[in-house]
Amino acid sequence: MNGLTRRSLLAKSGLVVVFASSGAAGAQEPEESANLPGDLDKYPFLDSWIRIDPKGRITVFTGKAELGQGLRTALMQIAADELEVSPASIELIMADTGRTPDEGITAGSHSMQNSGMAILNAAANVRVLLTDAAAWRFASSVDQIELQDGMAYGPGGLRLGYGDLAAGFSLHVMAKPDVPRRSKGRRLIGENVPRVDIPAKVNGGSAYVQDIRAANMLHARVVRGPSDGTQLKPADIDAVAKMPGVEKVVQDGRFMAVLAAKEWHAVKALRRLQAAGWERRDTPLPSIDLCDVIRKSPARDIPIFGYPGPPAPADARIVKARYSRPCLMHGSIGPSCAVALWENGNLIVWTHSQGVSPLRKSLAEFVRLPLERVHCIHVEGSGCYGHNGADDVAADAALAARAVPGRPVRMQWMREQEHGWEPLGSAMVVELQGALGRDGRIAGWRHDVWSNAHNGRPINAGGLLAGAELEPPFAPQKPQPIPMPEGGGDRNANPIYALPNASGTHHFVERAPLRVSALRSLGAHMNVFAIESFMDEMAHAANADPVDFRLIHLQDSRAREVVEAAANRFGWKRRVKGRPGRGYGFGFARYKNLGAYCALAMEIMIEPDSGTIEVRRVVAAVDSGEAVSPDGIRNQIEGAIVQSLSWTQMEAVTFDASHRTSFDWSAYPIVRFPSVPVSIEVNVIDRPGEPFLGTGEAGQGPAAAALANAITDAIGHRLRDMPLTSERIRAALRS
Amino acid sequence: MISLTVNGAAQSVDADPDTPLLYVLRDELGLNGAKFGCGLGQCGACTVLVDDRPAFSCLLPIAALAGRKVRTIESLGTPDRPGALAAAFEAEQAAQCGYCIAGMIMRAQALLERNNRPTEAELRVSLAPNLCRCGTHMRILRAVRRAAAAMGGGVQESSR
């Protein structure tokens, strides 16, 4: 490998390429379980996570990626806290298959739980080693050693830097499981450390994979039909190849890409090829409601939970309801993009994929290279909220780059390609049945959920869009359910309430008319929407206040505290009921029953003639365990609420028999500034000493349910089918 | 070669006259601020100022820019010396992925240059052309309110 050439090639874009695999943390094989916290259990050697060079410079490694959720800063904060240095003095390497531990996919709100806990404990181990080394060098006891800002201080003015100390011992040692955390001095964990990625993002700095501009780089566009299941009709490729500026038309089976030195020339070539027209390739899309299709399709029935209890008494009141959600889009503001370089039989891809390691494995099979010849480096893209086009565009870039060895290729999807081809969040149906005893308590509960898969992320070449376009094609990945307790379509179907005589079944529907995969919170958005709507329906039947009704069924003390905090901060008990057009709603869940707790109360106004909803006030409470960055948690929950209100109130992917018709922001509108809430307040309940819990997906379900409950409160009629549009409100008001 | 004025400097670029300004800013002039979002004028990620008015750079062919002044976020400041809006966005931590933010700042800059005492309703309507998918809206609004105050004005409560 000629690393220097590549380095100078890409130096212009600020990227430094390291292709060495020897000595890299990522090259170490995972170990047998040693019962260590988070992913330290898989990678127990300290130098997988932390290295200190002779000059005392600290490098921290994580296999998780910054996605705009603030992870980079939070992990720097955690390491800096234990190592007693400033966060700015730490270099953090994220998600790079040549350098970092394989922590799988940055998803499921696992980063703080898995990587944060690993780095916290690795740093505590390193702090102990530094302290021991200093005590030995100063011939003192460890009690006499103070660490501060990269220096160890001993008795009588003795001092040594971390670099000097670390040169005397190896960090290639296994972490010890029970190393205590630092107990003295000012803590950095819990401080609102400003995010290190924000200055570049708000000043036009280089921050995204889209911003890479390497010397000699070619711009590429992939050529496809308007949406998944379609293909273009044959075009005059020779004529396109002769268009001004077009360097190459790459074809491999049905895969096609155009390459040009100037981006606009690649776009014009793409438009010319698209003008040939298109046709449907797959079977026609259903002409009836997608939720009905999924409800009636053959399904694999998977039991989710079963809690014993006496049968509901004969005089119990039975309540039944059916809820539904259409397919939803990730809708990244920046369409997916990747940069690839094929050189000397090696492939390097700069990608905003959430899973660089599974992508590397998939790409190696896809381009038929040995694994060690493929290197994937995460660079931020536009927010993805799950499995969008990131992995697919990386494969598109790889195929294009293979055709022009030695030249970096920047592959950028167009807007209609992201809308047309990204994997969607599945349409879903939930049916709930509850029995209400005469004592006002729930005496029976039945949950049935129908859904397509929520995990189509690539694990091999068949999981990449272009995998089906090559000749011969790679067999598509078989859709699989995600087992509980995480769950996919059944995520959060298991109610957190203490309910007797309760059971649930996941009806997993393998055949998906539209391409589907992981969308932020997976099935939790729908299951929490349904459960928390249904809790209000049961409370109504019991003539009980919705918050009181939840509390009498809630035993988990942290759950109760979050519900009470949201209700108290909102002034739930003082709300004035019965004012025209005004409604109040509540929603609560613990994400996956494993992650963060989030409760929220909402006040809305409905304009009766138009059915327009104005969300006046949202007050949320969240318990994410020990809060590393309270403002980071607030930012995530605020975002979850606004995004979920957009999903729940106005979004639905549309299609006709031949293709998706949600091809841009006019055909798939999302929330704009005039329609966002007047105010959102997020209260963080800190739990010092408790494990970190991921926050990014905790708010979507509760926000959806609180909106549905507030609408019911305002208009006296319940909407159970998303989206909860003004048209549906008007129709309900007319009925 | 086509001549245009970007951030006060005369530039001559080798590009087809129908090339949208966005590609020239990003690829020919090396400016990262304006982003490709839709190419359709629907999302505002590419917003720049043309003669002090917000414009979708993804739609504007460079041939239409003779004699007109283009300003991008790079003209407002740097990470070391941020302008009033960037400083306010940092103070409010008003970004998640941040992909939309440069466009938001340019649209807000145009508003505050024209009227640094908008009402809350005017502020929301003026930002309406720009989309954010992370749901950072509340923070973006706070940041613009903060910047308006720093620029000697302020956002007035709307009567509701």
Image (spheres, rainbow, N blue to C red):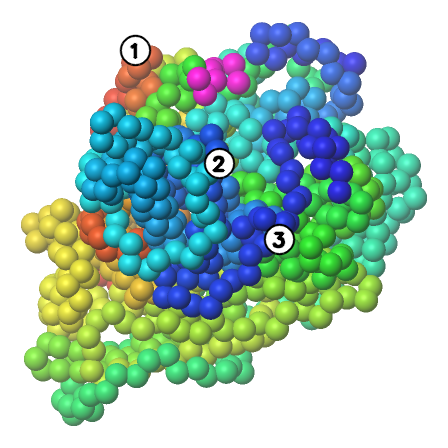
**Residue at (43, 51) in percent of width and height:** A46
What kind of residue is marked 1?
Answer: Gly
What kind of residue is marked 2?
Answer: Asp
Give the vertical position of A247 relative to A467 (above or below).
Answer: above
Q: Residue B152 carries which label?
A: 1
Q: Mark 3 points at which residue?
A: A391
On-image quarter of the N terminus of chain A: top right
In the image, which residues are magenta? Answer: B74-80
Q: Is mark 3 on a helix, strand or loop?
A: helix
Q: Distance of mark 3 from mark 2, alpha carbons? A: 34 Å
In reply to whether residue A541 is colored magenta, the answer given is no
Looking at the picture, tell me which residue is in the foreground, A95 or B79. Answer: A95
Labels 1, 3: front one:
3
Give the vertical position of A735 relative to A404 (above or below).
Answer: below
Residues at badges 1 and 3 in contact (C-beta under 8 Å)?
A: no
Q: Name the residue under label 2.
A: A53
Residue A221: % across, % down:
73, 42
- Main SS category, magenta section: loop
Count of marks placed on residues: 3
Graded by Cα atoms within 10 Å as few (under 14), some (14 to 19) or many (20 or more), the crowding at tag 3 reads: many
**Residue at (74, 16) in percent of width and height:** B13
Q: Is residue A18 found left or right of A70 in the rendered image? A: right
Residue B143: % across, % down:
34, 26
In reply to whether residue B77 is colored magenta, the answer given is yes
Q: What element carries label 1?
A: loop
Graded by Cα atoms within 10 Å as few (under 14), some (14 to 19) or many (20 or more), the crowding at tag 2 reads: some
**Residue at (21, 37) in percent of width and height:** A144
Q: Are marks 3 and 2 on the same chain?
A: yes
What kind of residue is marked 3?
Answer: Asp
* Chain under disc 1: B
